[in-house]
Image (cartoon, grey):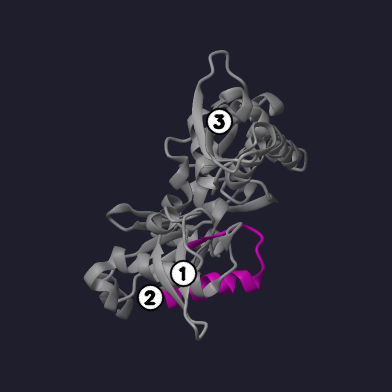
Amino acid sequence: MLNTVLGALSCDIAVDLGSAHTRIHARGRGLVCCEPTVLAVQEDRAGRRNVVAYGAEAAAMEGRTPAHIQVKRPVVGGVIEDYELAEALLAQLVMEVQGRRLWVGPRAAVCVPHGITEVERRALRECAEASGARDVRLVDGAVAAALGVGLPFDEPHGQMLVDVGAGVTEMAVLSLGGVVYSRALSVGGRHLDLAIQRYLREHHQLHVGLGMAEAIKCAVGGARPVSQEQGVRARGRRADTGFPGEVVVRGSSVVDAVAEQVRQIVEAVVSTLERTPPDLAADIAGTGIVLTGGGALLRDLDRAIGEATGLPVIVPEDPFASSVAGAAVWMSGPRLQRAAAG
């Protein structure tokens, strides 16, 4: 009865506290928040840290701050590295979502990477509770992503999902509402940005920030070369003169820059298939592989995986928000929670 009354005064939310972005889905409203998991922090003489900016505003400051302000990323590989800052960010975002109803905390489903330790799970739960949420429940990220793209994973039929996040790529084989086999690879979208950054430094003597590297990846990046490639201007600081400079980067150069990271992702997918039980592997041969996460948007990554495995690879319409959308579905379904509760 009490939960019913409190639920009328608040709203259920689903939270995906990712390494690159934090997304919040509110019941009846859809995706209401997608902000970079970034804060700009100023430390006073007593050692207390004060948040100057968060989200997109803080991300725009990266590489541009004076010495007394630092830009921090509190989540790495889906795991909280700075609890205090993660709590501060989530509290701000929950306040934006809830508005005037903040005095009644929302019920929250929080996505967690498969296979993290109990200590890491507890940290995520406590972070969500400290931000103002109540009745916090954890849902496996692979389960959430499967629900988000509409996979019937609670049936006795194997499904395979590859979630390419910012800090980690997760491969999961699911059946009967749970994860049968999974593997995590410490390579994601952020590593592609670092590879582009390193390539420009080594081949063009140009130092660029990670924001510029990401923009290049989104504009002309890909897993395979194309016949008619485009170019994009990269701006930064010349290593030889120390002065500002720019070069035109072709798509083929970006493909070369990220080739090693793409190879590792493809090989991890192949290795996961090799370790999948035969009956489930037969199911996957018929249904294919679903590719989600922000990294799924890298041009031709689906084709590279498909050629290596001989299986169809499906990229959903909005792979970026699959996990948080699925967590919202999980939150509203008691049967699903019983089958795959975190």
Determine whether 177 is above or below 299 in the image: below
Task: State the mark number for residue 132.
Answer: 2
Sequence-wise, which precedes: disc 3 or disc 1?
1
Q: What amino acid type is highlighted by mark number 1?
A: Val
Considering the numbered disc 2 on the image, is that residue within a helix, a strand or a loop? loop
Measure how far apart labels 3 and 1 are at the Cα level: 32 Å
Q: What amino acid type is highlighted by mark number 3?
A: Gly
Residue 8: within the magenta? Answer: no
Determine whether 278 is above or below 48 in the image: above
Q: Residue furthest left?
A: 100
Task: State the mark number for residue 221.
Answer: 3
Sequence-wise, which precedes: disc 2 or disc 1?
1
Residue 302 or residue 157, whichever sits in front: 302
Q: Residues within 10 Å of mark 2 (few under 14, many from 20)?
A: many
* Residue 86, x across and y down, in percent: 49, 68
According to the image, label 1 marks what residue? 41
Q: Quadrant of the N terminus?
A: bottom left
Considering the numbered disc 1 on the image, is that residue within a helix, a strand or a loop? strand
Which residue is located at x 63 percent, y 36 percent?
A: 200
Measure how far apart labels 2 and 1 are at the Cα level: 21 Å
* Residue 41, x across and y down, in percent: 46, 69
Which residue is located at x 28 percent, y 54 percent?
A: 29
Sequence-wise, which precedes: disc 3 or disc 2?
2
Magenta range is 110-131
Which residue is located at x 54 percent, y 49 percent?
A: 154
